[in-house]
Image (spheres, helix red, strand yellow):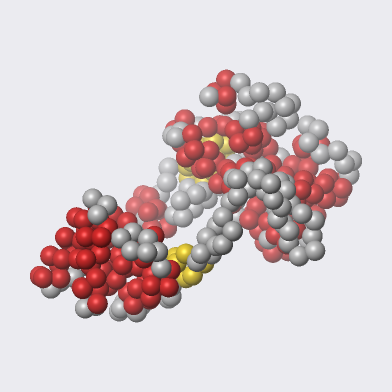
Amino acid sequence: MTLKRSILALLLALGVAATAQAHSPDVPRDPDQLARYRAGLAAYYKQDYTAALKEWQPIAEQGSSAAQLFLGFLHANGHGVTRDDGAAAEWYRRAAEQDSGGLIDGVAVSEPNVNPTPGAPFRIVQGDGPPLTAHSRNLYDYTTLLNVYQGCASVAFPPLALFNFAPSPARCAALHAMGLLSAATLAEQAVEAQAVINAYGILPEQNIVQPSHWFLYVPQAISVTYANAYGRISVADNLCAYSFAATGAEGAPVPLNAAAEAALFGTSNGIPPSGGVNLVNDAAPGGPKEDRGSTPDQNLAGALCLRGLSTGPDPVTGAPLAGRAAG
């Protein structure tokens, strides 16, 4: 399989992603150029890419950065022209060079992320390592597995190595009690948890950084938000007994500060904890509480619920999911 380069310009930073391009402040100010730009947009939204190219090409040559960005998009996707990543990169570069506000640091170039069909009859080999045949799982699958085992696996790393601030011996003990780990001692359980993660396809080279991701709440938050997104479930439905809220010193939900709420769009990255909003375990003993501190095992029950939504059967018993989880 030949992988063609795809050009990933920093379109969002330029304010020209898809429909937002129509409202970009970089639209031409010259009346004739503006007329052609709008005519190109009208053709584009009708998927008449050849007509759009005809309108945008002249004003892109004259220096319209908005038209240049659109030409980059057309060439990168083969819309109205033969796909040409080199030409796309050149148009993106020309547009980026007109950034007079110093907002754009550069144009990034990357290979596409290719996921082969699960079960496809080929293997992935890295260096001299063993062939990997269990490939092509989706991100939610990998993330929910990490959400179950990483807190225990982090115990195997030095206490303060690379932001390893949240290892969970109690998570190891709970996994062992449920039969998900067989090792008897804490040290052996942490090693076994790491082995489970690596056997699932996470490369050993990533082991050293995963404790920091666990501390920063990456797999925990993504597991919840992806489940809500895939299931089209409102956060108000409290999937797997999770919700989102600001929390006080004791971890209980509190109203979000008005100033923080007003700035949330600019300060939040979209997944908790962010902008003063945290992940909350509504099923915590004594009432809803910030997720990590809600139980000694850092809410393993919630992680297992989310894992079951990914894999289908209950991750502990192997039985089919029932009730709301089955829907």
| Residue found at x 47% / y 70% | 108
Residue 25 lies in quadrant = bottom left
Given residues 288 and 58, the one toward you in this image is 58
Residue 153 visible, this angle: no
List the single residue furthest toward the top: 323
| Residue found at x 53% / y 38% | 227
| Residue found at x 59% / y 58% | 1
| Residue 56 picture location, percent across and down | 23, 67
| Residue 47 picture location, percent across and down | 27, 52
Residue 284 lies in quadrant = top right
Locate residue 173 relative to residue 21 in the image: left or right. Answer: right
| Residue 128 picture location, percent across and down | 80, 63
Q: Is residue 260 above or below residue 238?
A: below
Locate residue 172 relative to residue 121 in the image: left or right. Answer: right
Count of numbered circles in the view: 0
Given residues 219 and 97, the one toward you in this image is 97
Given residues 229 and 155, the one toward you in this image is 229
List the single residue furthest toward the left: 31
| Residue found at x 50% / y 66% | 5
Residue 319 visible, this angle: yes
Q: Is residue 143 above or below residue 309?
A: below
Given residues 236 and 225, the one toward you in this image is 225
Locate residue 59 relative to residue 101 in the image: left or right. Answer: left
| Residue 3 picture location, percent across and down | 55, 62
